Amino acid sequence: MATVIDLDEKLLIGGEWTEAEDGARFDVNDPGTGGRVGSVPNGTEADVKAAIDAAAAALPCWRSTTALERARILRRSADIMRERADEIARTMTSEQGKPLAEAKGEVEYAASFFEWFGGEAERIYGEVVPPMNGANRVLVLRQPVGVVAAITPWNFPAAMMTRKLGPAMAAGCTSVVKPASATPLTAALVLRCIEDAGAPAGVVNLITSRDAGMVANTIFTDARVRKISFTGSTEIGKDLIRASAEQVKRLSLELGGHAPYIIFDDADLEPAVDGLIASKYRNAGQTCVCANRAFVQRGIYDAFLALLKEKVEAMPVGHGLAEGTMIGPLINEAAVEKAHEHVEDAVAKGATLVTGGERLTGEGYDGGSFYKPTILDGVTREMDIFYEETFGPVAGLTVFDTEDEAIDYANDSIYGLASYFHTRDYARLMRVAERLEYGIVGANAGIISAANAPFGGMKQSGYGREGGSVGIDEYLDVKYVLMGGVGVV
Ligand code: SIN
């Protein structure tokens, strides 16, 4: 296994890498061993205020740079990230746990947001609208919202940050980033890329802190912060909605998901199994777009389950830096317990444990939080896993007979982020895609994330879209200008 990193990082405030105001730091640990991999400052309220001061001070200059210059800095940031992909990926695996190959994939995915939004910076067009009165002229301008706060999760420590910073920078906004306290080191390395790409001091600022409540409170009570973009749980998202009311702050929320994965009888078997595995077991099941419920039509059920079992049992579980690992550790002990509770609850209520269903201990696992990739057969609506996000490597299968039944199962959720299905019938493909109440639909595809597509949910999965041509709208205000008495009547 490659060496685990040892990295001590700092806060970034107004172009200076600094310690917390009171000098306090906290350790970052490897979920695969429990060992220390580095440390970061435990930012205080004064640090958050200083970061907002820096972002506010940088705003007038940054918002008036040309789109071309912002695009150049974004594209250079992407290039530098790619040059440093090994270092960033190794750091990510060490603090987050995902297999190194996945971490490298995430670095590329993260860089692609800078590249994509570099292009979008050049396309922030306004409009000239035909007036209702010939003497008038009507313009529509799109302008940066101002200072933005980006609160990012631990499951994709690089990509969830660039998915917010890319459009923010492209639009001409300045930002304060608060990464999850489990994965702040990757965040610092990405911010170093932006800095080295030539972003002026204060355009991006980094606050690491264990006190997420204090950071949120400071951000939400400061009138200079005009917009908050958050990726995380629905529970915290609801708190942020409440907090945003006081100053009517703009929010983008990418919250929990509970993706259905439907396999119709006419699907190609192997791509369907591979699609479910890619969706379910990516990042050990710790993504908001992970399949959490598989609905398999009766005619293909047995063959599907047999092939799924064979492939899942062949997936090596281990430390993310070990050669060949496909499933790394879960982020912490609580995550292992949650996955196991879902399995126990399902089995107690009649599901069959096909494989897995236990935490892994012994050589190579002790000290880490590993859970064996699991398949449950016979999942029903009575079981917790049917309605709750597991965020772990547990796939639950349910048999169905008709298309209506599959849609009914799939839409029976408070969440509406991602959904998937496999079929070779193109009429059904269109019909089912339209009927699924989800912001993202993968048809014959288990991996749907990409910088060029709008990512976001319906229902309690949040609002706003990240990525795609609409991703930048979240960071722009629309202003209408009526120019009176300027036309020839
Ligand atoms: C997430 O889990 O929140 C994002 C996953 C992705 O972008 O693919």
Image (cartoon, rainbow, N blue to C red):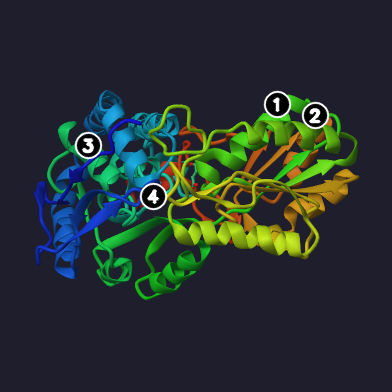
SS at badge 2: loop
The residue to which callout 3 is attached is 194
Observer able to see residue 384:
no
Horizontally, residue 68 falls left or right of residue 476, namely left
**Residue type indicated by callout 1:** Pro
Label annotation for residue 271: 1
Q: Nearer the viewer, mark 4 or mark 2?
A: 4
Question: Dividing the image into 4 quarters, which one contains the C terminus?
Answer: top left
Cβ–Cβ below 8 Å for labels 1 and 4? no
Q: Nearer the viewer, mark 3 or mark 1?
A: 1
Q: Nearer the viewer, mark 2 or mark 3?
A: 2
Estimate the x, y position of residue 231 in percent, counting from the top left: 44, 54
Question: Dividing the image into 4 quarters, which one contains the N terminus?
Answer: top left
Observer able to see residue 79:
yes
Estimate the x, y position of residue 125 in percent, counting from the top left: 38, 36
Estimate the x, y position of residue 246 in percent, counting from the top left: 37, 76
Mark 4 to mark 2 CA distance (whole Å): 37 Å
Q: Of callouts 2 and 3, which one flags the residue occurring earlier in the amino acid sequence?
A: 3
Mark 1 to mark 4 CA distance (whole Å): 31 Å
Horizontally, residue 333 falls left or right of residue 311, namely left
Mark 3 to mark 1 CA distance (whole Å): 38 Å
Cβ–Cβ below 8 Å for labels 2 and 1? yes
Mark 2 to mark 1 CA distance (whole Å): 8 Å
The residue to which callout 2 is attached is 267
Going 83% across and 28% down the picture, which residue do you hit? 425
